[in-house]
Amino acid sequence: MPSSRRVRHALLAAVGALGALATAGPGRAQGRPALSVALDAGAAAVRYDGYLSSAAVSMTPALQLDAPLGTLAARGTYLVFQSGSQSLQGLVAGSVFTPPAGALRGEMSGTVGMSSYQRTNEPAVRYGHALGRGRVHLMGKDQGLYGTGSLGRTALSGPSQAVVAYGAGAWRRFARFSVDLSGTATRVGDTSFVDAELSARWAAGRWSVDAFAGARGLSDGGGAGVYGEAIGSYRLTPQLALLLSGGRYPTDPTRGSIAGRYVALALRIARRVSPGGELSYLRSYRLPGERGSAGAPKRAAVELLPAASGARGIRIRLPGAAAAELMGDFTDWQPVPLQSLGDDLWELTLALPPGSYRFNVRADGGPWVVPPGVTPFADDFGGIVALLVVR
Amino acid sequence: MSRRARVLRPLAALAALLATLAIGSAAAGAQAPRTAAERLAGRLDAGTRAQVLTLVDSAGRQGLPVEPLVDKALEGASKGASGARIVLALRTLAGELGAARVVLGTTASEPEITAAAGALHIGVRGEELAQLRRARGRQPMTVALGVLSDLVARGVPADSATAAVITLADARVGDDELVEFRRSVERDIALGAPPAAAASVRMNGFAPNSFNDGRSLGAEQAGAPPRPRRP
């Protein structure tokens, strides 16, 4: 099989696996994924090693899906250079965490990427890579260690090459500042090198700054020297941010990019798409591993829905319950029977002005409890109570 | 009586009847708020009821919300708490409502004061609430305070939770994103992350950009800014 076809098959397999990770598995069952979308539009001045300086404009759409156990992200970048040359890049990356085993967590991630560089009146240069990575985290409260191993293939308009990388790192987080120190050894075909990197992040209010510094050595064909980048972000509105970035990055034989210096300014329009579109502060989901109180209705969840004439419907899922009641601030703490909607759903419709309310539920005349998935608060009378915030 | 008058008179009578019915039903629908005494009638013994009403009256004279006090008394009654315990809970709540109003100022709404009193009750300090008030500016605080209380109840230390919510408020994060932030922290906690670390990690992800910073995936994740790379 030609190498380009092998890479294409590997890319398709990786995309399929990432899609499966995003849409199936425990993450889907345990909570609703949240989707973020963004568009960066900007301009840059860049000088690749061995080339003259050039200006470029870029457009970068991106989306990210966050599920309880993992993340799936996709991004494309379209660059038009001053010379008229164009670059098109696409990348999909996914990451899934395993449940914790003490302080240890496992993380599996995969990345597939393709790019095309088109010079005027010349054939396009095409490139692709597929990488899988395993990482073991030793997680503390504000610090952690990790070890990483990666395997994959990369191809740049020719035969594909194996990619092998391994390394280790440590991080520490402070109130508004975090640092990460790592070392990684990489081999791509017959090219090999070792990178030592220090990254730091600072965030306060609308500002954030990410800075990276690194040194490459023990290199056989991968270049050597120091590099560093800084990315500043200023949030204009919840959906709009200004990004200023610049620095030097090294040659990356895995992703097929050459070293360069750049400064870039971009405007980001982003939106986090809340699932369901409900009005409620509480949403219907069940946390993994949750047991519920003794006698509590099993697999219950609470939703607050709009109803006619400005009223709200409080909907609770109570599998197996023959009768259900609710009492709270909005019922003068008198038990009110919930109406069965079938399919284990129970509902109470009432006028609820914005505010915070306390309530309890019970099934089949059992104890008054907080529905699983809802944070329990001490009620001052030796029990627990749920808090409902209505906007 | 002219023919026209014979036609108009029944119509006028019908219109008057409809108007009367409409006014009557509107009056019935717009129920006047019940007083504290009416709400508490038959729910507490006479001695407890008298003490509760005294506390409620006192709070009302100070301009504090009284509904939360009545609600608390009714909750205690429904849960079978003793009169002494109910009165103690109300005294505590009245103090917290007063402290909340001092911190938030006289322009704060009743839901905000109630939510702030709840936050004070579970360990958030007054100066932290004042910081949050400043950070939120003129934006309503009820949801932010609910998120803050939720995080603390989930085990996030009060100072860490407050710092996280204040940072998000500084960044002009809206209510939807605050709720999303809380959900993310709860997921992480449920998956085994220490509560303080979960809040810190998620705060770093939400505050500066709308995307996570991509630490777990490297700079390739969607949140990273575009580099002018080329092969």
Image: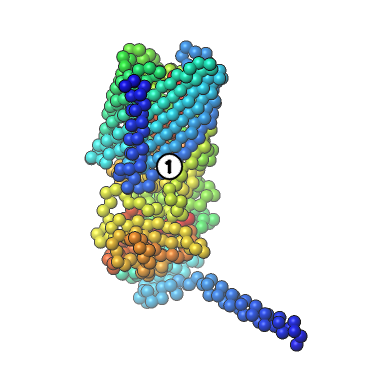
**Which residue has dot 1 on it?**
A35
Residue at the (42%, 38%) spot, across then down: A64
Quadrant of the rendered image containing residue A89 = top left
Q: Position of residue A146 (x, y in %)?
A: 28, 30
At label 1, the amino acid type is Leu
Q: Nearer the viewer, residue B115 or B130?
A: B115
Quarter holding the N terminus of chain A is top left
Placement of B101 over or under B189, stated as above or below: below
Placement of A373 over or under A159, stated as above or below: below
Say which element carries label 1.
strand
Q: Nearer the viewer, residue A110 or A173?
A: A110
On the picture, is B69 further left or further right than A264?
A: left
Q: Nearer the viewer, residue B191 or A30?
A: A30
Q: Position of residue A365 (x, y in %)?
A: 28, 68
Residue at the (39%, 19%) spot, across then down: A156
Residue at the (45%, 53%) spot, across then down: A278
Q: Nearer the viewer, residue A121 or B133?
A: A121
Q: Is residue A100 visible?
A: yes
